[in-house]
Amino acid sequence: MNYRDRLTETGLAIFLLHGVIEESRYAVRNYTRKHLPKDYFRRFLLDVREAGHPLSMDDVVRHHRERRPFPPRSFAVTFDDGFENNFSVAAPVLEELEIPATFYLTTRFIDENGMSWIDRIEYCLERAPAARLSFSWDAGPRTLRTADDRIKFLEYLRSRVKQDNSIDPDGLVSSVFQQCGLDEVTSSGDPLDLKMSWAQVKKMAASGLFTIGGHSHRHVNLCFLAPDELEREIAVSIRLLKEKAGIRPWHYSYPEGLEYCYSDNVIKVLRKHGIVCSPTAIDGTNDLDTGLFHLKRIMVT
């Protein structure tokens, strides 16, 4: 995709990324291109910088508050989750090109070098021999022999589990590992899994070019949580950013970020904790009338 075509004369494009790696050498993992090759990332940045005007998310908030038009063809760069490659691979390129970026961190991932449920299953299916998987809620069983078999199954899981609150993702992960005959993992040093340390988060925050925001504590669908769980999920993420990195965030992004992943009640709790802006993962561009808790983003793949 030519991302410069998503820039507009009067609007704002917010680009959503997750990771940047030196190379991709996997048969199954990273089939979604969640982690971009470094050379591709550099070309993307050079292209949109040549065509447009980079803004920080702090700039975006100021333009909204002052009702001041965005510069022509404005864009912002954002990352979700907190992968270590944001620090070691992406940040040096951003610094070289003097492009600001905001990094929304899942605090449990940082605290424990944790992995999301779907990354754990990808990890398993990259390594497992042929497997025959069966689940009580699925029409299966499903036989996974080839890389294509596994990718189709991962696509199915992404679609089904993210919208079905009755499925326990952690229980699903345990079942997949057990049925594949592998020991379950919760963390990994692979470039697709390794998260930033708190020391690295502090360095990013002190750079002057980068902004740190929250992205929940456990990376769960905030709309699936009961009121007390929602309060705790957001409060813990903000407390850890303050205690571990000295950051009092006023930026946030919703895990998953689609229409069914945030609500007026979620926004109310975020506001209570001092958050002023939380973009979605809904595709699109924005203008000054787009609310700061409803901003759209464009996935870069």
Image (cartoon, rainbow, N blue to C red):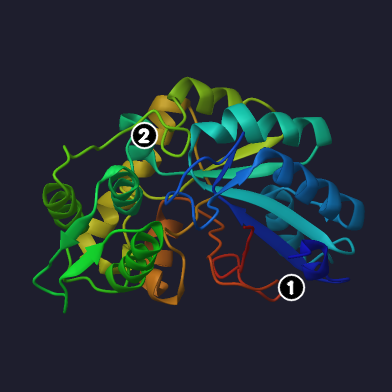
Considering depth in this image, is 99 or 162 the residue closer to the camera?
A: 162
- The answer to whether any part of residue 131 appears in the image is yes
Residue 204, compared with residue 236, is above or below; it is above
Q: Are the residues at dot 2 and dot 1 in contact (C-beta closer than 8 Å)?
A: no
Considering depth in this image, is 221 or 265 the residue closer to the camera?
A: 221
Residue ID for mark 1: 287
Residue ID for mark 2: 240
> Please, what is the three-letter code of the amino acid marked with disc 1?
Asp
Q: Residues within 10 Å of mark 2 (few under 14, many from 20)?
A: many
Apparent side of residue 69 relative to residue 239 in the rendered image (left or right): right
Residue 193 occupies quadrant: top left
Residue 160, compared with residue 105, is above or below; it is below
Q: Residues within 10 Å of mark 1 (few under 14, many from 20)?
A: some
Residue 300 occupies quadrant: bottom right
> Please, what is the three-letter code of the amino acid marked with disc 2?
Leu
Mark carried by residue 301: none
x 54%, y 48%: residue? 18
